[in-house]
Image: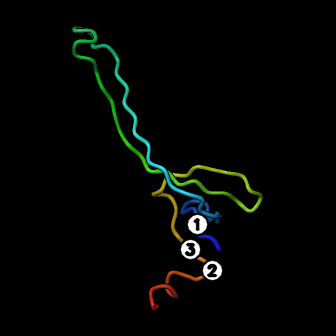
Amino acid sequence: MATVVEHNQTGKRYYLLGAGFGVFQSSKPNMFLGNLMADVEDGEYALVCVCNSQGEILWLDATQVTVVSIDGQTLQELATE
């Protein structure tokens, strides 16, 4: 069976394939001290890999999806077990 997720903004449903975690960092030379005191920007983000009913693979931000069902059971059904 599968885990079905729903995109919060569009309402479209997808099959969850997996999750990933990304980290990035970039720097640019400082105007006065060059690379000695470079301006650094960094961050992190969580993504989920999903596919639609045609098998097209997409990456979505993890905060933009909600789990609808797992192995054909709703979350309410799973909570009572």
> Which dot marks residue 55?
none
* Residue annotated with mark 3: 68
Q: Secondary structure at mark 1?
A: strand
Pointer 1 residue: 6
Q: Quick check: marks 2 and 3 in contact, CB under 8 Å?
A: no
As measured in the structure, the alpha-carbon distance from the residue carrying label 1 to the one carrying label 3 is: 6 Å
Q: Secondary structure at mark 3?
A: strand
Q: Residues within 10 Å of mark 3 (few under 14, many from 20)?
A: some
Query: x, y (%) of residue 18?
Result: 55, 57
Can you tell which of label 2 and label 3 is closer to the viewer?
A: 2
What residue sits 57% from the left and 75% below the top? 70
Counting residues from the N terminus, which is met first, the one under dot 1 or under dot 3?
A: 1
**Contact flag, marks 1 and 3 (Cβ < 8 Å):** yes
Between 70 and 76, the one lying in front of the other is 70
Q: Report the side of 79 relative to 33 (left or right).
A: right
Residue sitting at x 53%, y 54%: 48
The residue that label 2 is drawn on is 72
Which amino acid lies under the numbered mark 3 shown in the image of this protein? Answer: Val
Identity, as a three-letter code, of the amino acid under mark 2: Gly
The quarter of the image holding the N terminus is: bottom right
Viewer-proximal residue, 68 or 80? 80
Say which quarter of the image contains residue 55: bottom right
Residue at 64% across / 63% down in the picture?
14
Give the residue at x 44% y 48%: 21
Task: Give the percent coordinates (x, y) of residue 16.
Answer: 59, 62
Tell me residue 23's x, y (percent): 40, 39
Spatial CA span between label 2 and label 1: 14 Å
How far is mark 2 from mark 3, CA to CA?
9 Å
Q: How is the image coloured?
A: rainbow
Badge 2, how many Cα within 10 Å: few under 14, some, many 20+?
few
Q: Position of residue 10 (x, y in %)?
A: 61, 60
Whichever of callouts 2 and 1 sits on the residue coming sooner in the sequence is 1
